[in-house]
Image (cartoon, rainbow, N blue to C red):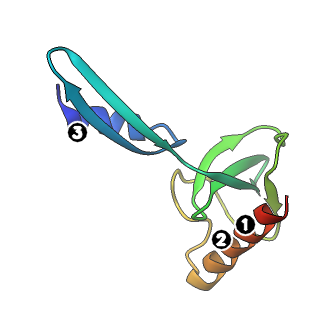
Amino acid sequence: MDKERVKTNVLNNPYVKDVKITRKLPSKVVLTLKEKDIKGIIRVKNYFVDIDSEGRMVHTINKFPNGKLIYLEGIDVKEYVFNEYVTNDSIKLKSIVEVLKIFLTLI
């Protein structure tokens, strides 16, 4: 088994943050997944994008989700790029992450 190939394939799932692969002899392979912590959504063109607790774009969604997510307006993202930060400006990114943290403590 090519562990790196398996890890790469699993990490292509937008909701997976990390994966640990272990073997249990004689014939088991165990995958331990760590999911991304979805904290909010932004609008990009005609669709929405989940963002995680680090301010990274996770996955596109077609309709506004039900649930406890904050909708952030005023973030100028031209296109969805998997796992990229919503902004390259470190000050704005830090502010976005702080807003997500504060909002979610209130709900």
Q: Position of residue 69 (x, y in %)?
A: 79, 52
Q: Amino acid at mark 3?
A: Glu
Q: Amino acid at mark 2?
A: Val
Seen from this angle, which residue lies furthest front? 25
Q: Secondary structure at mark 2?
A: helix
Q: CA distance from mark 1 to mark 3?
A: 33 Å
Quarter of the image with the N terminus in it: top left
> In this figure, which residue is indicated by the disc labeled 3?
4
Answer with mark 3 or mark 2, whichever residue precedes in sequence. Answer: 3
Residue 100 picture quarter = bottom right
Picture residue at 68% right of the left edge, 50% below the top: 50
Q: Secondary structure at mark 3?
A: helix
The amino acid type found where label 1 is placed reads Leu
Count residues near mark 2 (Cα–Cα under 10 Å), then give few for <14, some for 14-19, many for 20+: some
Q: How far is mark 3 from mark 2, CA to CA?
A: 31 Å
Q: State the residue in front, 97 or 33.
A: 33
Residue position marked by numbered label 1 in the rendering:
100
Residue marked by disc 2: 97
Label 1: how many residues lie within 10 Å, few (<14), some (14-19) or many (20+)?
many
Estimate the spatial distance between the alpha carbons at disc 2 and disc 1, rounded to whole Å. 5 Å
Classify residue 39 as left or right of residue 22.
Answer: right
Q: Identify the element where label 1 is drawn.
A: helix
Whether pointer 2 and pointer 1 mark residues with C-beta atoms closer than 8 Å, the reply is yes
Q: In terms of sequence position, does the residue under pointer 1 or pointer 3 come before the other?
A: 3
Quarter of the image where one finds residue 31 = top left
Residue 32 spot, x, y in % from top left = 38, 35
Left or right side of 67 for 9: left
